[in-house]
Amino acid sequence: MQATLEEEEPLTVAIVGGGIVGLILTIGLLKQNVKVAVYEQAQGFREIGAGIAFTANAIRCMESIDQDIVTALRSSGSVATSDGNGADPNDYLRWIDGYNQLNQDDPHRQRMLYKINAGLRGFEGCRRDQFLESLVKLIPRELVHYGKRLETAEEPTEGRVQLKFVDGSVAEADAGILTTLVRVQFGSSANLSPDLVIGCDGIKSRIRAVLLGADHPACNPGYTHKVAYRTLIPMGDAVAALGQCKAQNQHNHVGPYAHLIHYPVAGNKFINATAFISDLCDWKDEKMVTEGKKEDLTSAFANWNLCVRNVVSLSPEKLEKWAVFDMWEYPAPRYNKGRICVAGDAAHASSPHHGAGACIGVEDCLCLTNLFGEISRTVGQPPTQKSQGIRTAFEVYNDVRRTRSQWLVNSSRRVCDFYHQPEWADESKWIKAETCFEELKDRSYKIWNFDYTSMIEETIQGYRKKMAA
Ligand code: FAD
C-alpha cells in the first residue's frame, strides 16, 4: 500500500548529496525543526584539500541560516585578509599583470591593474576538506547515510516521494532537494518515508534529470574550454616566490589565454593557488578530473612574469587536471517539479571565475530554510495541506532564485574572457584591455552587495500570497 502524507506528522525531507550546499541546507532545516536525512554517494565525506573562498555577504547568509555554520567556517582555519600595508583593515580583490616583466632588478614587481575594495573581511578563504569536516560535526550522525548513490526518484500524485539507490535500497520523503536533502531513516528496517526531496547532488545531478527528463540538454553540462590545476603551497615558499604582500593577500594574475589566482588558507599556513588555462580542444574524457603534469603548467606559463613562473615551479610533478564544465549553454528551465527541487550546483553549476558558485548555493539554502520555516508554521492548520505547502514553496523558490543564480553562470564565463584577453601581451592594447575592469566591478558588486533580507521578504510574501490564492 502506498504511504500517504500524514498531515499531523512533521515534514520529512530527503537531501541527496552531502557537499557544501547539502550540508548547509541540512543544518538550516534542522534549525527550523524539520526532519532531515542526507543521502551521500561517497563512503564518507572526503572533499579535496583545495581552497574555497566565501564573500562577506555569503557569510552573512550563513549566519542568518545558523550562526554555527560561521563558527564551523572559522574553526576550520578560514583566513580574512586586509590591505597589504596593514594601514587599511579592508580586504581587496586585486588583478595584476601576470605576463609582462616590469623590472628585471626587482623580480617581484608587477603592474597593478585594478583593485576593488571588498570591505572588512570581504572574502574568507579556507580548505574545503576542513570546512566540510566542521559542518558534518553539526549534524547528528544517524541522519547522514553514506554509500547511498541515488539512481532515480519518483513523485506519485498521492503519497511520499520515492528514492531509489544504486545499491537497490529505497526511501520515501515528503520533499526532496536534489543535492540532496532527504529525511529518511535508512537501515531502520522499513518505513523510509520522506515527504519531499531536495537534490544537492552537484553538477552531474541525477535529481535534475528526474525534474527535466534525462534527455533534456540541461542534463549535460558543457565544457567551458578551460582547465584548472589546483595546488596548496606552504606560506614560506609562497613568500619567497611572490614577496610577502602578494603571498599573504588574494591576487589574480591575468594574461593571454590563462590566469593564476591565489589566496591564503588554513590559518595562513598555505596559499591556495589555481591556474586556469584556455583549451581549444574538446574534452573527450568521461571524467571531469584526470591526471595532469607539472610540465603542462610550465609550458603554458613559459613566457610569463617571473612571479607566476615561481609559483608554477612549486607545483608537484603530478597534479589533478580539472576540466571546467558549467550549465551556461543550456540552463535549467526550472528548479522544481512537485515535491522535488534542486539547489546549488545541481541547479546552476557555474565556472568558478567569480569565486562565488558555492556562495550562490548558500543563498539558495537561505531561501529554502525560510520557506520550510513557513511550511512548518502553517501545515497541519486547515485548510493548508502539507503537499500543497511543499509544492508552493518550491514554486516560490524557483521564482526567487533562478534568474540570479543563472546570471552568475553567464557572468562567470564573461569575466574569464576578460582575464584571458590576448591584448595583455601587447603593450599597445593594454588600455583597451583594461576597460574590462569597469564592468568587472559592477558584476562583483552584484554578487557582494546582494540584498538577502529583501530576498527573504520576497520569499515569505510570495509563499503566503500563493497559499492564500
Ligand atoms: P558538490 O560540492 O558537487 O557536492 C555534491 C555532493 O553530492 C557530493 O558530495 C557528491 O558526492 C554527491 N552526489 C552526487 N551525485 C550523487 C548521487 N547520485 N547520489 C548521492 N550523492 C550524490 N565557489 C565559491 O563560492 N568560492 C570559491 O572560491 C570557489 N572556487 C572554486 C574553484 C574551483 C576550481 C571550482 C571547480 C569551483 C569553485 N567554486 C567556488 C564552486 C564551488 O566549488 C561549487 O559551487 C560548490 O562546491 C557546489 O556545492 P554543491 O554542494 O552544490 O555540490
Image (cartoon, rainbow, N blue to C red):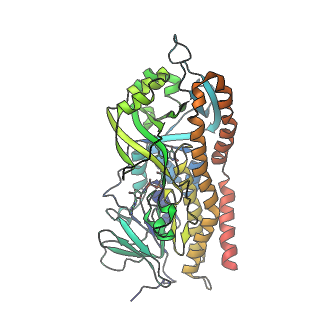
Could you tell me which quadrant the C terminus lies in? bottom right
In the image: residue 237, left or right of residue 405: left
Asked whether the viewer can see residue 83, the reply is: no
Residue at coordinates 58% horizontally, 77% vertically from top-left?
A: 389
Residue at coordinates 59% horizontally, 22% vertically from top-left?
A: 111
Instruction: Give the x, y percent position of residue 211.
Output: 50, 70
Residue lying at the far front of the rendered structure = 281
Asked whether the viewer can see residue 444, the reply is: yes
125 vs 227, nearest the viewer: 227
Q: How many marks?
A: 0
32 vs 281, nearest the viewer: 281
380 vs 161, nearest the viewer: 161
238 above or below 177?
A: above
Instruction: Give the x, y percent position of residue 265.
Output: 45, 37
In the image: residue 349, left or right of residue 381: left
Instruction: Give the x, y percent position of residue 208.
Output: 48, 65
Instruction: Give the x, y percent position of residue 333.
Output: 58, 65
Residue at coordinates 46% horizontally, 54% vertically from top-left?
A: 20
Could you tell me which quadrant the N terminus lies in? bottom left
In the image: residue 44, left or right of residue 122: left
The quarter of the displayed image where residue 240 is located:
top left
346 above or below 100?
A: below
Residue lying at the far top of the rendered structure = 105
242 above or below 187?
A: above
